[in-house]
Image (tube, rainbow, N blue to C red):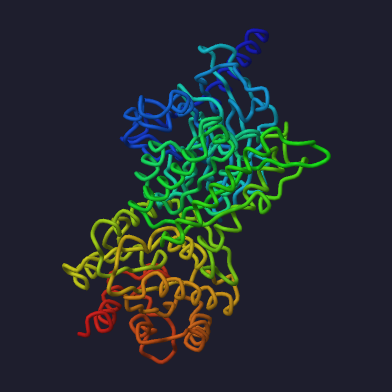
Amino acid sequence: MKRITIILWAIMAVVGTSVSAQTVWYDPMQAGDEPYVEGRAWNKEIGKANYSRLPDRFEGKVSKHVWTLSKHTAGMSVRFFTTAKKIKVRFINVNAGKNYPNVVSLNHSGVDLYATDVEGNTTWVPNMMKYTFSVNGSDTAQFVYDTREMPVFKRQGMYYELYLPSYNGIKWLSVGVDKNERFEFIRGSQERPIVVYGTSIAHGASASRPGLIWTTLLKRRYDIPFINLGFSGSAKMENIMYDALSEIEARAYIIDCIPNCEGLDNKEFASRVEYGIRKLREKSGAPIIFMEGNAIAGSSTHLHRNYYEQHEKDSIQYEVYMRMKALGFKNMYYITHEQLGFTAEDLIEGTHPNDVGMHKYAAAYAKVLDPLLIGSDTMKCFTPCIQHRDGSYEWMTRHNEILALNHTIQPEILMIGNSITHFWGGEPQSRCNGGKTWQQLFGKHRVVNMGMGWDRVENVYWRLSHGELEGCRPSQICLLIGINNRADSDERIVSGICDIVALIRKRQPQARLHVVEIYPCKGSEERVRAINTLLRSKLPLDDMTDIQDVSSALILDDGSGRIDPTCFLEGLHPNEKGYGRLARLYRKFLFGK
């Protein structure tokens, strides 16, 4: 009997372990109407058919080699959120076991994972060699990631971005987590991307893993989508490729094709460069950045075999660039091979950059992109970032909903803030504590609620600099932010608000901006008054910018300065009564009545 009992306990233990460790698998191609795939310009058009970078209508128009290479998932990624501490990724490559000699397996056919915690801090997730590759076309590759010991891990879960293979394609992919854990695919910011058209170097050769290609390095630097149209050996500036680029509404275009154009007739090459500039300018005024070749000459490398050919094309490209600028084509930039500054230490075999070289490429482009994408639009005391502190809604999803609304309904008024604004009412729809008063205040006016629960000044700044002020020309904007930064000094909070104001004034100069003083909250009434006093002394006002004090709607009339508890849910968020009182004061400065 004792032996039977022991055996039964053993069986139960095994069964219990298998049940508790049961893995649920999620396929980004099957999770919604549009695939949850990042980094391709025609995602909706290509749909669930495959992981290609070009849609089917380009077959027969682009070269055969470009069409074949478009099946590679260079620069593409899958984003998701999960509370899981162990993540498994299974996939089948298009070309199993077929590596290039100068591209390591992890970059050629592997995946690469990055994590972003609730505060917006991003870190690489090592796989600790827990991966296997497929041997033939029917085998499944598997990568396993363990986040239990990651210092940024928090029980609220994290955002993840999984970079796909650079020099291979994906037939099928799925992400697995324990059945008891939360999991959902998400979309990155749906703002205008930076589009890269280039050679094998843009394609990914020869970084050690997908997250270290120069395009993905810059993607994380700016938190901006990148479209990687790198085609190894095949970036020859054909007109059809510029036609394809012109279809993409980009924040900037990067043209890095010199090494693949060495064999072209010089006159034909010059014609292609000019066609590209004219074609892109037909559709867009976005910056166009040209890069020269990376060929080097020196005693340690002797002479690069294509040194003279590349620099001949460099000269022709530069001549066309200068001529087109003289003709009035604006917003174009040029990076020379001297500015790239390559040495023998930056190359893996004399042609393609190693990881050090990839960082040099990113640094060279950053010198041009930083002024274009950031410039003076930056925060003095904070680093703009995303967040995921409130589990009741998906932050990035709401950001994308706001982007879509601002591009479609042409809002008259933007209401920017944190959860106090978020929960008032309106569109995008969410939790609502004051919907009736919202409707009474705004009626038939087109208003977008740009409040986001748990946002701090640095999160609002990130959103506004990542597309939320594009696609619309509102007549009025209300800004209420700062209460969630109470752990920061008064000076830092006010500095952050002033930075946001400067950004709004630059991006929406036609709008009247109402900076609303921070609402009082339970136990922090004196602190809030001090912040607001400092804000009034520091905020630069003009004919289009004013500051509004609406605290009288929420405090007791006994002169104590304490909040009226009947106007709040819990001392921070107004209830319907509180929003009703606020609405009367908002109506005066928004509509003059």
| Horizontal side of residue 265 vs 564, given as left or right | right
**Quadrant (top left, top right, bottom left, bottom right) of the C terminus:** bottom left
| Horizontal side of residue 178 vs 45, given as left or right | right
The answer to whether residue 273 is above or below residue 367 is: above
Q: Is residue 384 visible?
A: yes
Question: In the picture, residue 306 is in which quadrant?
Answer: top right
Q: Residue at x 34, y 27 (%)?
A: 56
**Quadrant (top left, top right, bottom left, bottom right) of the N terminus:** top right
Q: Residue at x 69, y 27 (%)?
A: 129
Across and down, in percent, residue 261 comes to 54, 36
Question: In the picture, residue 201 is in which quadrant?
Answer: top right
The answer to whether residue 395 is above or below residue 91 is: below
Across and down, in percent, residue 283 comes to 33, 51
| Horizontal side of residue 212 vs 406, given as left or right | right
The answer to whether residue 263 is above or below residue 503 is: above
- Give the residue furthest to the right: 299
The answer to whether residue 481 is above or below residue 209 is: below
Q: Residue at x 71, y 50 (%)?
A: 341
Across and down, in percent, residue 343 comes to 75, 44
Q: Is residue 77 visible?
A: no
Across and down, in percent, residue 96 comes to 56, 16
- Give the residue furthest to the bottom: 559
**Front-most of 518 and 577?**
518
Q: Residue at x 56, y 40 (%)?
A: 258
Q: How many marks?
A: 0
**Front-most of 166 and 233?**
233
- Give the residue furthest to the left: 444
**Front-most of 561 and 550?**
550
